[in-house]
Image (cartoon, helix red, strand yellow):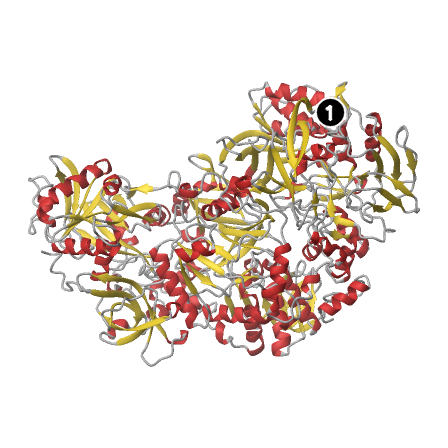
Amino acid sequence: MRYSAFKIFTQGLTGNKGWKPVWREPDPKPEYEVVIIGGGGHGLSTAYYLAKEYGITNVAVLEKGWLGSGNIGRNTTIIRSNYMLPGNEPFYEFSMKLWENLEQDFNYNAMISQRSILNLVHSDAQRDAFIRRGNAMFLAGADAEYADADQLRRELPFLDFDNARFPIKGGLYQRRGGTVRHDAVAWGYARGADSRGVDIIQNCEVTGFDIQNGTCRGVETSRGPIRAKKIAVCVAGSSGRVMAKAGMRLPIESHVLQAFVSEGLKPVLPGVITFGAGHFYVSQSDKGGLVFGGDIDGYNTYAQRGNLPVVEDVAEGGMAIMPIIGRARLLRSWGGVMDMSMDGSPFIDKTHIGGLYFNGGWCYGGFKATPASGFCYAHLLARDTPHPVATEMRLDRFRRGHLIDEKGQGNQPNLH
Amino acid sequence: MIINHPLLGPRDAAEFVYLGDASLIDRPDWQDKNADEKFYEYGYLRENPAGKHQELWYHEQGDRSWLVLTRDTLTHEITKVEMARDVARARGRSK
Amino acid sequence: MTQPNRIEGGQVDRSKEVKFTFNGKNMRGYAGDTLASALLANGQRLVGRSFKYHRPRGILTCGSEEPNALVQLRSGAHQEPNTRATVTELFDGLTATSQNHRGSLEHDLMAVTDLLAPFLSAGFYYKTFMWPKAFWEKLYEPMIRKSAGLGSLSMQDDPDSYDKGFLHCDLLVIGAGPAGLSAALAAGRSGARVILADEDFTPGGRLNAETLEIDGMGGADWAAQALAELAAMDNVRVMTRTTVYGAYDHGIYGALERCTDHLASSDGKPRQILWRIYSKRAVLAAGSTERPIAFGNNDRPGIMLAGAVRAYVNRFGVTPGQQVAVFTNNDDGWRTAADLAAKGVEVTNIIDTRDAPAVCDVPGARHIRNAAVMDTVGRKGLKSVTLTSGQVIPADCLAVSGGWNPNVHLTCHQRGRPEWRDDISAFVPGRDLPVGMAVAGAANGAMTLAAALTEGRDVANAQIKDLGFTASRKTAPKAEDEPRDCAPMWHVGESKNRAWVDQQNDVTVKDIKQSYREGFRSVEHLKRYTTLGMATDQGKTANIPALAIMAECTGKSIPETGTTIFRPPYTPIPLGALGGRARGKDFRPYRLTPSHDWASKNGATFVEVGNWLRAQWYARPGEQGWRDSVDREVVMTRNSVGICDVTTLGKIDIQGKDAADFLNVVYANAFGKLPVGKVRYGLMLREDGICYDDGTTARMGENHFVMTTTTANAVLVFRRMEFVRQCLCPDMDVHLISTTDGWAQFAVAGPNARNLLRKVVDEDHDISNEAFPFMACGEVTVCGGTPARLFRISFSGELAYEIAVPARYGNAMIEVLMKAGEEFDAVPYGTEALGVMRIEKGHAAGNELNGQTTALNLGLGGMVSAKKDCIGKTLAQRPEMNRDDAIRLVGFRPVDRSLKLIAGSHFINQDEEAVMANDQGWMTSVAYSPSLGHSIGLGFIKSGHERMGEIVRAVSPIHDTEMDVEIVSAHFIDPEGERLRA
């Protein structure tokens, strides 16, 4: 069913009773060409691009819960391509371009809103590093703009310019950055994949891999065994747990990132703003809630909840740069489990086990990567060679000494 | 969270800094013939279990002890707290 | 007539009349009223507009679960959006305005959206607004955003202050209703340290709203007596106006105490206090929440929950209507009818969905069995209700009861799942409770008064027995078990018109059915697709009915369909309270250097360096800008002598027989053979082989070293060294102390440095070049016996020393140094001049040691000793980190010397396109060199060491500029190092 204003009109006249399910609820077949484990954003976009771009439709997406219940269902919705390193920036800019055409592409309004993202600068060294980054963005074909304090004072008069502990000295803008209605991305990809013949199987948990002589031939699931030529794991947050079933250790730790939303407010913030001297980033949703977050709690965990020190630290950061939000109220907080990798950058790669592929390690930055991650993973699955913008996202890069460490924090995941 | 420090009793986890898996104690020998591979695994690969996890915490806002906690990553229950130095010695580290 | 709906009785203080305004209209109430009860007393039924359809809305509840009666409270910078009238204590001078309407509350222009409702059903926006593409950002989205949100922020800084505090107890009792009071009494009598917290300003919970008796007295009176007993116990702390909002790990609870929200002004006191409560055990006695029944137009002002209606009558002496009908599926609804009738309020009809005899006798009321309300009339206030039989009943208030849901919220905060109980048709706490928590009373499904009282006592006794206390023998208070039969009905199927489930977000029964039809069938999909339960009330009255309606669609049972899981906070918490005092200049503490006072008196401009404030430059009269000052400081230092406070560098005292061996592990270069009395530059790697930090380490004695680290890494390096000491080398005889704050340290640099120091250092210490050469160190005395340490080290490239004295002499020391330096024209210099001089010398600093660069990149590859192990040694040897074309640190100067280099520009070879594939490296640090008279820079470029003299492009597209630069040695000044050895 193609969605349009006309469709809404005709449905409205007939009591909205003619809408059809957005996806089927198929039973798993015994065998597929590709089985994707994980019906989150990346898994669904992988299925979508496999079908649409590479013509591979004999595909199942296995999801242990409800589709979209991965981190696509619990993030702070920011999209941006303001990275610095050659291993990252072209990939994220590719993702940004996919975002910019996504809605027409999958005929679903995910409310992609290029409202801008601004990283505030509080020291000269930070300014130098952001200029380096902004220039790298230009070299990769993205946009960037450096704003000085006077410009920011005109544009964002509600920031604390006069009484700040760490004065705002400027900021790096990416005007094309912004926010997206995150759940709609999952639904749009699911709908697009489903309509092309992909089986999306919810409530189907993978319990083991069928590995014989170094080759993976299928998976055991809570709904029986399923065979496939290629098995594509895509379960960021649970990567450690799932890959352990294949006997693999990963350069990843699982950590919780808390996120927060305030009660709905009339428009306050024009775009996404991040604090450069504390842990706080914020945007305002189309419904009016301030959506914000900060640092990860910092300890290994698979529990989707965090603790008070970080809650308070994040609020302190918010009050430090915009004390106008003091009388806004925190409505809900939640926690998502992150694949924190050893250099802060992800993996889209084959494993040493034949037929078994791995996509993960997205840290807290996976949402913005959703389109490119799916596209590049689909490319890898279809062609068995990395997509040109994802050539460095390899599992063996640490053995070789090729680090993609944007923040320069080294092999300690909770610092990225 | 509350960490029951072996010397100081229960302390708020906010006084501590987290490092990671207690396998970081088991630093390989640089002269081992497989030192490259062993250091790669030491530096980069983690069990990352969903369940009991032995891990290193540092009492930075306290007595500067490094501790090894046994903590469940699903429930956050802490079942054991040891001085890291004792653990290191028990694992054969010396000078 | 004022307060037309005020009736006799209740707990308000009629001797204290309170004036307030609503939408500018003057109204009166009494102390003890909530804003909601006062509005009802004044006959104000219409209070707000709903989120999506701008439907006129009134007051549904009497508590924090309220979805409709949200107002903007107070004015100016104190304006507080989305405030629930139902929990706002009335105070004299209160001002409130309604939200989310264009034009007046009565005539909201946006109400037109209600007419378009057929085209705005669940998720409509996902299916449209996509064409033409550009219109989304330019037209559709701005339109949606403008209509989003309910209340507004004032856009002024929050003028109030907030405190934070910590509390400890044996038993935390959450909720001071019958179960909570009973629990607190039992635990308190045993001697345990108890905290009893309740969100209301009058504890007692439903006892204040009911006419039930305990131990032969009125429930409210019993509650007051229980509180008096608790207040008299030293081991019990009763906290009213305090919401326990979250259950966190290991018995830690978050609580918010509202200290001045019930007053006209905070008067300088903290508005609220955010508590962290550390409990050994907890009893959750949070009571239950009544649920509505969905039927056509069930959202009209005047349609309220039955329990709320009788709370307004019993507690506040206010009747929500003059002609009340009751619609119930359970026995409890009858109590509303009976209580109202007893207070002389006209109850016309009791519409019971059950085909059962009357529960009690209600004078004047007609009992209609086996019936339901299907529709209502009265857009801005209820006029009549229509039954499924077609019968129309006039009413200005309809009291609806669909049964009660236990408040399980806090049991879910650690991902616990509630369980369904068929006998009460509700979810109760599951087995996986937060550690240490037990649940009692209605929150646990004990839905009657007697059961709640008994369970409260029993659960508290079990909890404290676990902690070793002996429970008191007192029996639980006596009360009746009131009738509580309930026949679940979630919505009236016969209704043709829209029936609201989530009133604030305007989610109707039809939306839920459409959600099912479109495949959004799991609870999470339902929530996300329809926005059900996402409003400021978090679906406290909506979630369970919605789940039941979805279960009806799927044909599964409610528990099979799913459970809802609640996240903190229980009720919304102001961000100001979560931030506490950490705002403005108090966001983080300041660390000040020992010469701070002196520097502020001598024209210093300060800069934030981590938590430190350091002098950036010292302006002199007549200087036109910072560059003038910095250039002068550099020139005068290089020509004579300059002084800089370098106390912020990390200082670590290392002692023990194995100290030298220990340094060999943490530093890449060797320290074993460093003679006593000498200093060595040290390079530290991370275990992954990347450079971590650098500094100097002085050997003060055979087993005694003094290390310096960079300012930024002082804490981190110390932490890592303790890791090595305790975890990797546990038997080494070595001890570490951070002495960063113990010593004030000053760099004295320039050709006259020695001459100056000779006047300060006591004469028996020979500091001649021969006796105290470059890289010497030693203990000395200054100013006639004051102990000091002297290091002959140089960051500036000049003849230079660093002199350290105990921190308490720091301010005196800068004065002595400056006084002694007068004859040499000594200048104090700040971090800018320090930076210029280190760039002139080609020393790496933070911009180069950025966590991404190796010793090889920095030109320090030779420092990594081949003869010993060190942290980072093995992994630094990985092939990709040792490529032939690895980036190298070199110097740069503009071909056109008049141009200013830009830090952060990237290098592109001549004749190559400026794209990422051609990126050769980047400029890390730049400065104007007053010594050379032009701009100079440091940067990393591929194979830089082999490209001296080559011209490359330094591009900065973000500035829309580029320039040709020449690759040169990073040592711009005195490359042979003659000056520092002079």
Quick check: can you spot residue C202? no
Quick check: can you spot residue A333? yes
In this orientation, which residue lies closer to the viewer: C452 or C733?
C452
| Quadrant position of the C terminus of chain C in the picture | bottom left
Residue matched to label 1: C10
Report which quarter residue C464 is drawn in.
top right
Residue at left offset 89%, top offset 41%: C393
In this orientation, which residue lies closer to the viewer: B38 or C774?
C774
The image shows residue C963, relative to residue C438, as above or below, that is: below
| Quadrant position of the N terminus of chain C in the picture | top right
Q: Secondary structure at mark 1?
A: loop
Q: Which chain does the residue under circle 1 lie in?
A: C
Is C96 left, or right, of C778 in this rendering?
Answer: right
Three-letter residue code for mark 1? Gly
Is B49 left, or right, of C185 in this rendering?
Answer: left
In this orientation, which residue lies closer to the viewer: A105 or C213?
A105
Image x and y of residue A366, in percent: 54, 62
Report which quarter residue B62 is drawn in.
top left
Q: In the image as oriented, which residue stretches furthest toward the bottom?
A: C911
Image x and y of residue C848, in percent: 31, 61
